[in-house]
Structure formats: C-alpha cells, structure tokens
Amino acid sequence: MKTRLLVAAGGMGTRLGLGGPKALVEIAGKPMLVRTLERFAGLGLVDGAVIVVPGGYEPAFEQALTSAFPSSRFTLVPGGAERQISVSNGLEKLDAGAEIVVIHDAARPFVTETSIRASIESAEADGASTEAIPSNDTILQGDSNAYLVDTPDRQALWACQTPQTFQVDVIRRAHESARRDGYLGTDDASLVQRAGGRVKLVMGSPLNFKITTPTDLALAECVVREGLA
C-alpha cells in the first residue's frame, strides 16, 4: 500500500529553555528533525514526507532539510495551536493516492526501523496502530488535591509512543468526527478509538522517548555519544 510519512514538528523549545523550534535543536551537532528522518530513510519514507512546522519558520526548516537531504522533496505545512490541528493540516497535504500514513513526533529521534515496519504492517491489517511499551512502574491515579484514588493494574497499562500509523481514510474520518464534535484528544490513536476503530498496540522501545526537557536533551546526547541507538 502506498505509504507516506507525516512528521509533527510544530513545537517550540519553550520547556528546553530555547526560543526557536524544538525540531531544529541540535543533538550532537545534528538537528533533531534530521536525526528523526534518518530513521525512516531505510524504508524509503523520507522523500515526499509532510513536515508540520511552526508558522513563519519555513525557511529555517527548508535550509536544514536541503542540507541533510538534498535529493529529497518535502511538503512543509504550518501547524496549529494544538497538535491535533497540526496533524489535521498535514493530512490535508498528503499525496493523492496515499493509503497509509505514518505519523511521528520529530522529538522522538531514536525510533527503530523494525518497529516502524511493524506499525505499517499492523495498520495495513487492522486499520490503525500505535507504538507503545508496557508500563514497568506502578501507576497511581490521584484526585485534584493529589490524594491517591486508585492503582490500576499495570499489566493492562501501556505508555504511548509514536509512530501512530493508519489507513488514510481511517484517520481522516476520525479527525473529521473529532472536529465535528468539538473534541480535542491527546493523540491520533485515541481519535480512532473514539470513532469506533480498533488500534493495534505495537511494541516500541524505552529509547523511543520524547525530548521535552533539558534532561531529555542531555540523555539524547548521551544516547548518540555512546551509540546506544
């Protein structure tokens, strides 16, 4: 099935203490977005990728992408105020005839090719998939005053990651349903589940973490320096 990559790179580096786009922050001398895209190169998904970026920063992204991937073409799309809006904007710019879309966070630069391939195969078979890892920690549910309310069985709990991969018509219908109902979700897989679809959980990796804080960035530098991923 014709597969396309959509990268959510619209975040700013506020929690990193930076003023520019998070996806252009360097990890060991290379922009985060470039390191992320390199993970998809072996699957032929870099050329033709849709990249959702902060509005007004398109020239900076074009420069970084052209320098790293001079023979590849990209579609840059301005993001919205929320990730859900940004992804919806990106879905509108997919190539005609695209059947599968792999949606990935630019801030997860250590995803493995094996898990990407598994997510695509699951989406082809089931319509929707998301990478996730089983929780190793006991998860506590608290109330608004930070008192313990419940302790869910961790055997049923997974920590969500990306990529989240879908048949294009499935995810578009899910976004349309959410938009029609005024619903704002935290991720795309939950929109599909909300719309009545089934989402297959695909095993991810602890190294497929999302870079959000300075500690995460320091850890990413360590991962690259030590060759851990």
Image (cartoon, rainbow, N blue to C red):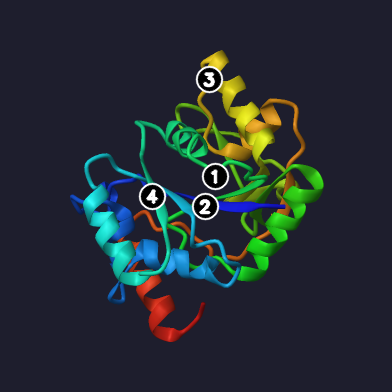
Q: Is residue 90 above or below residue 228?
A: above
Residue type beneath disc 3: Arg
Name the residue beneath numbered marker 2: 104
Mark closer to the chain start, 1 or 3? 1
Mark closer to the chain start, 4 or 2? 4
For marks 2 and 3, give the CA distance.
Answer: 21 Å
State the residue at coordinates (34%, 71%).
68
Local SS, label 1:
loop
Local SS, label 4:
loop
* Discs 2, 3 touching: Cβ within 8 Å: no
* Discs 2, 1 touching: Cβ within 8 Å: no
Residue type beneath disc 2: His
Name the residue beneath numbered marker 4: 9
Name the residue beneath numbered marker 1: 95
Residue type beneath disc 4: Ala
Q: Is residue 40 left or right of residue 192?
A: left
Mark closer to the chain start, 2 or 1? 1
Residue type beneath disc 1: Asp
